[in-house]
Amino acid sequence: EAGVAQSPRYKIIEKRQSVAFWCNPISGHATLYWYQQILGQGPKLLIQFQNNGVVDDSQLPKDRFSAERLKGVDSTLKIQPAKLEDSAVYLCASSSNIGVSGNEQFFGPGTRLTVL
Amino acid sequence: GENVEQHPSTLSVQEGDSAVIKCTYSDSASNYFPWYKQELGKGPQLIIDIRSNVGEKKDQRIAVTLNKTAKHFSLHITETQPEDSAVYFCAAPPSGSARQLTFGSGTQLTVLP
């Protein structure tokens, strides 16, 4: 089966510019996650979707970050305007929520964002 | 929320030796403990997990042990190989979460040939 796809793989922008990341989860996976991974740290959850609804966005900086999953499949994460501290890898993950193995989260390769 | 602490942050072993990485968690209600491996330029990948109804689980050269009383769990890799070199993360679910995970800070494992 195809894995989680993300694009772009790398992005360099100036501070105060905007940027968008795209994620296509594994087919049939109802839950989609966006994580921020700062260099040398573990992934930190930004937002969790169940189908096209938001389950938890308590750690999403809503003044500058937004995310959507309109049709319950693909998702986009946007930052506007970007700050220097937003430099990180943005990971997308999905899970099936079916059965005992439904907890497993499958990660995409990530988008490495550098804000100058 | 859940607090997951992981150590050591770096670990170097000789090829063929064993490696042990330890994690502690704060929420006694947590019942699922996965370990992920992240290679350079890739996303984390699940390598083994354990649920709170068992104390140990093995899969070939890797094993995970869980001590619910002490609220800690460990990853054991035996007969290490150069391809085991990567960053390893433990994780645990925050209480009341809907299939969420809080990750540890990671351990950079280097297997020296």
Image: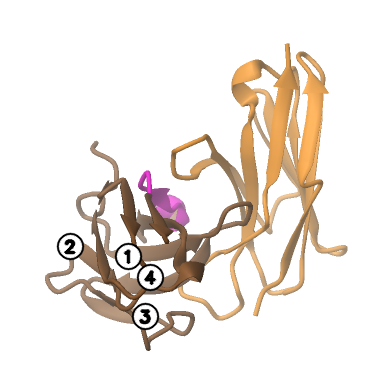
Chain colours: A brown, B orange
Badge 4: chain ID: A
Q: Amino acid at mark 3?
A: Val
Residues at discs 3 and 1 both on one chain: yes
Q: Amino acid at mark 4?
A: Lys
Please state which of the two labelled residues, at mark 4 or mark 3, is closer to the viewer: 4
> If you read the primary sequence from the N terminus, does the residue marked by circle 3 or circle 1 appear first?
1
Report, in whole angstroms, how far the alpha carbon at label 1 lies from the one at label 2: 9 Å
Q: In this figure, which residue is indicated by the disc labeled 3?
A: A55
From where the camera sits, is residue B13 visible? yes
Going by the image, does A67 lie left or right of A88? left
Question: Which residue is the extreme one toward the left?
Answer: A71
Which span of residues is magenta-colored?
A101-110
The quadrant in which the N terminus of chain A is found is: top left
Residues at discs 1 and 2 both on one chain: yes
Q: In this figure, which residue is indicated by the disc labeled 4?
A: A15
Callouts 4 and 1 close, C-beta under 8 Å = no
Report, in whole angstroms, how far the alpha carbon at label 4 lies from the one at label 2: 30 Å
Label 1, residues with CA under 10 Å away: few <14, some 14-19, many ≥20: many
A110 shown above or below A37 = above
Label 3, residues with CA under 10 Å away: few <14, some 14-19, many ≥20: some
Q: Amino acid at mark 1?
A: Thr
Q: In this figure, which residue is indicated by the disc labeled 1?
A: A31
